Amino acid sequence: MANVVLAVATSHSPQATAPAELWPAMEDRDKRNQGLIDLEGNAVSYEELLEKAPESIAKEITPEVFARRAAANAQGLARVRAELEKADPDILIMFGDDQKAAYQNDNFPALLIYRGSEYVDTPRNGGEAKSYPVETNMADHLIKHLTANEFDISNQEYQNEGQAMTGAFSFVYHHVMTNKIIPVVPIHINTYFPPNQPTPKRCWDLGKAVQQGVESFGGNKKVAVLASGGLSHFVVDEEVDEMTLKALRDGNKQGLIDLPLHRLDAGTSEIRNWIATAGTVEDKKFHQIDYVPCYRSPAGTGCAMGFGYWK
């Protein structure tokens, strides 16, 4: 039978790979962001965040801190890459979310498995499109297994002309699978957009069902699982990040299920991808590679990066 031999998790924000000297320019984008959520789960403007922000944030937004944290991001991502390459899996199952690059409001699925023979990354800047292999037999098997276990799974067999790849997954090709391309099963979770965001418990149960589906798949295949996204952004929430990471370190399923929903919106919602991944490896220990709270403005905006693996 197939087995999950490893799981990894990485943030996928552009800030995770951007040079430190580009971080200050990201503040301008935050000032225009109409989707900022404060630490109480309220929609706020940049100016409202700035008014409430502690003065201590000033020490987080110096060139020296930016450079140190950019280096930590590069090291964390390199370690994720190394762990995946060391495991050398036959199949990679990816949990990620879409931010209206691939799916739109005409039909935005809560849960979807891509099952086409190839997955095409069409850059939005008009660059060259690239095709990557999908493990279609595993994708179809998981769709059937999950449906039999009361998950209503959407499926997608092809991309429309020009349809982008979900950014959570294109990041993996550009920054994780840089040395070897592994056939994948992309699983989309709508972490981001109400009203059909799965709960943390549903995400855990999904991961557990995926593990069981893998183990019922014929053949002696090594399978790895990857979570793409998180941690808190676009307002850094170190408290909810530590709640998440502590629950992962402790193997505390209930701690993940009980994470406060009102703090799992906007980019922070991508913690759901980590929860689903944790569900696939309940028998394995989580190793935290690093946690890097990348503030980029005096209002406390930015992206907290997380890197880790289970084995």
Image: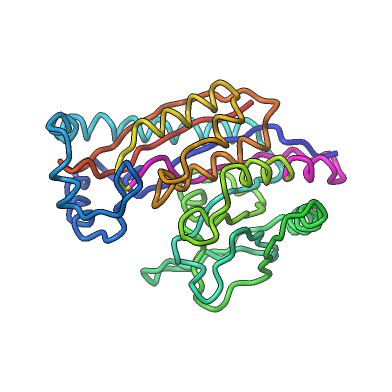
Q: Position of residue 220 (x, y in %)?
A: 84, 39
Question: From the viewer's perspective, is 245 left or right of 27?
Answer: right
Residue 142 vertical position relative to residue 61 in the rendered view, above or below: below
Is 253 left, or right, of 5 in this rendering?
Answer: left
Q: Quadrant of the N terminus?
A: top right
Q: Nearer the viewer, residue 233 or 48?
A: 48
For this view, does 273 lie left or right of residue 125?
Answer: right
Q: Position of residue 162 (x, y in %)?
A: 49, 76
Q: From the viewer's perspective, is 267 left or right of 32?
A: right
Picture quadrant where residue 23 is located:
top left
Query: Is residue 231 magenta-colored?
Result: yes
- The quarter of the rendered structure image containing the C terminus is top right
Query: Residue 52 colored magenta?
Result: no
| Residue plotted at (59% across, 60% down) | 110
Q: Residue at x 81, y 57 (%)?
A: 144
Q: Does residue 285 lie above or below 78 as drawn?
A: above
- Residue 246: percent from left, percent from top: 49, 24
When asked about the image quadrant of residue 282, the answer is top right
> Which portion, as a residue range, is magenta?
210-233
All told, the count of numbered labels is 0
Specify how the rendered protein is coloured.
Answer: rainbow
Q: Nearer the viewer, residue 163 or 200?
A: 200
Depth check: give the residue in front, 174 or 260: 260
Residue at point 33%, 43% (across, down) = 40
Q: What residue sits 50% from the left and 53% below the top?
A: 191
